Image: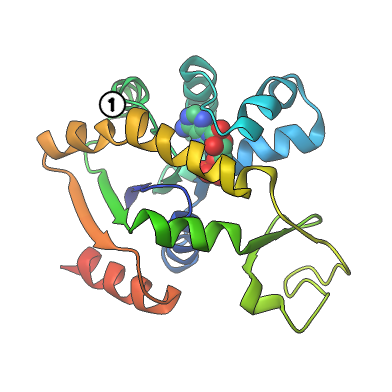
Amino acid sequence: MRLLLFGAPGVGKGTQAKLLSAKFNIPHISTGDILRQAVKDETELGKKAQEIMSRGDLVPDDIMIGIIKYRLGKSDCKTGFILDGFPRTTNQAVELDKLLQEMSIDDIKLINIYADEEEIVKRLSSRRACKKCDHIFSLSEIEHSKTCPDCKAKDSFYLREDDKEEVIRKRLEVFRKSTEPVLNYYKKQGKVISINGIGSVAEVNKELLKILYE
Ligand code: AMP
């Protein structure tokens, strides 16, 4: 199975990608996670990406395409993969198509998760990340505890720079301008499956699996 999880920031792509990755035993490749790790490790890539990401802008296409080429070339991607956060521009989509053609892959599907923008702003500004394991939680999941449910780190929750309201609004604007056209690119190829992202994680996942099995 080869899926592209598509949607505005905060719509739940990462959460659903993790569940699908565990269910189908295929890697979850989040370009946002790759960049955040590079920032943490203070690599050359991280140094370039940090400021761009905290502004809510997009990292240049050539860098992102290089990252994806390298990652999809790894052996764990042979049986399938889930891309989360890539492609984010039509140029990235065109380059991904070329790469998949070279890899003789023609069975990708784009899962378009959609939601109301104000709902997204609410969701993103009320989520917190763990400094140690980077996992994300809603405030309601962690309100009674200062311990990360996943890695057990204490007092490790923080509001990501790019989850601050003014940056969220910028990210949504970038999504509308640069990323939404990607949807039409794949619609023309008949590869889009759309799903409503409003609902509990379990509800959206159930709907997603139903569609994938159809
Ligand atoms: P995400 O966690 O997917 O919301 O990504 C966080 C940030 O990483 C984005 O706001 C961008 O700055 C950057 N980023 C992630 N994926 C891409 C991509 N495919 N193209 C350009 N920038 C990206």
| Left/right of residue 178 with respect to residue 188 in the rendered view | right
Q: Residue at x 62, y 25 (%)?
A: 52
Looking at this view, is 134 or 55 the one in front?
55
Q: Is residue 73 visible?
A: no
Q: Which quadrant holds residue 120?
A: bottom left
Q: Which quadrant holds residue 199?
A: bottom left
* Residue type marked 1: Asp
Q: Which quadrant holds residue 54?
A: top right
Q: Residue at x 39, y 32 (%)?
A: 88
Question: Badge 1, how many Cα within 10 Å: few under 14, some, many 20+?
Answer: some
Q: Is residue 27 above or below residue 157?
A: above
| Left/right of residue 31 with respect to residue 83 in the rendered view | right
Q: Judging from the image, what secondary structure is the residue with disc 1 in?
A: helix
Confirm if mark 1 falls within 8 A of ligand 1.
no
Residue tagged 1: 97
Q: Is residue 112 above or below residue 24?
A: above
Looking at this view, is 47 or 37 the one in front?
47
Could you say where residue 17 lies in the image, as x and y percent from the top left? 45, 57
Could you say where residue 128 lies in the image, as x and y percent from the top left? 68, 61
